[in-house]
Amino acid sequence: MQNKNYFRIATAFVALFVFIIGCNTPAAENEKPVEAATAPKEVKPDAATIKAEIQALETAWATADNARDVNAIAAFYSDDAISYSNNKPMVVGRAAIQKDIEEGFVKRPKGSTVAYDVVDVYAGDNTATETGKITRKDEAGKVTYTGKYMAVWEKHNGKYICIRDISNDDAKEK
């Protein structure tokens, strides 16, 4: 009778051992854990692509500026944009910015041109902050003004639009 009990206990331990080993068998090499297969991948913005996109906007902006096309320049701004210009109060809203641009064209010499050079772009999901340099030349091509700026762009319907900008002059050489 004692041998039967030993046999039953030994059989129970062997069954338990096989069960434990079976539950701890590692997954096959080609199987991925469920959590890794379903985890969303983080997509980081491509800074070089965004910088090129912002530079294209700035080039188009300069083209409109050089053509003195106030409506085309104003179209780069959101309705609630704010512009902080050098030695002036802030200008709030696209209509006010457009009026400020018109007033600036009156003061600017005919034949002058401007270029905007993107220096850096810091981008997130739907926004990009840009820093850049401004160079204005007279009709003969002589540099008459240099400055710097920062613009905050936000994607609206897949297209960047300026929501904030600030600019100021470089120090005049003596």
Image (cartoon, helix red, strand yellow):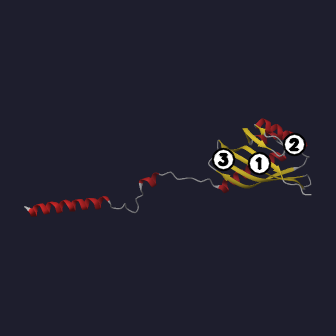
Residue 92 rendering spot, x and y as whole percentages: 76, 37
Picture residue at 36% right of the left edge, 62% below the top: 26
Q: In screen coordinates, is 103 left or right of 132?
A: right
Q: Which of disc 3 and disc 2 is earlier in sequence?
A: 2
Residue shown at 74% from the left, 48% from the top: 151
Residue 154's place in the image compared with 15, above or below, is above
Residues at discs 2 and 3 in contact (Cβ within 8 Å): no
Please, is residue 11 above or below residue 131 in the view? below
Q: Secondary structure at mark 3?
A: strand
Q: Nearer the viewer, mark 3 or mark 1?
A: 3
Q: What residue type is disc 2 on?
A: Phe
Q: Which residue is mark 2?
A: 105
Element class at badge 1? helix
- Viewport quadrant of the N terminus: bottom left
- Kindly report which numbered mark, 2 or 3, lies closer to the viewer in this rendering: 3
For the C terminus, the image quarter is bottom right
Residue at the far left: name it. Answer: 1
Secondary structure at badge 2 equals: helix
Q: Earlier in the sequence, mark 2 or mark 1?
A: 1
Viewer-closest of 170 and 32: 170
Dot 3 crowding, Cα within 10 Å, few <14, some 14–19, many 20+: some
Residue found at x 84% / y 45%: 87
Q: Which mark is residue 60?
A: 1
In this view of the protein, which residue sits in the foreground, 17 or 51?
17
Residue 128 in the image: x percent, y percent?
A: 68, 49
Classed neighbour count for the residue bearing mark 1: other residues with Cα under 10 Å, few (<14), some (14–19), many (≥20): some
When asked about the image quadrant of residue 6, the answer is bottom left
The location of residue 55, given as percent across then percent down, is 73, 52
Q: Which residue is mark 3?
A: 127
Number of other residues with Cα within 10 Å of mark 2, as a class: few under 14, some 14 to 19, many 20 or more:
some
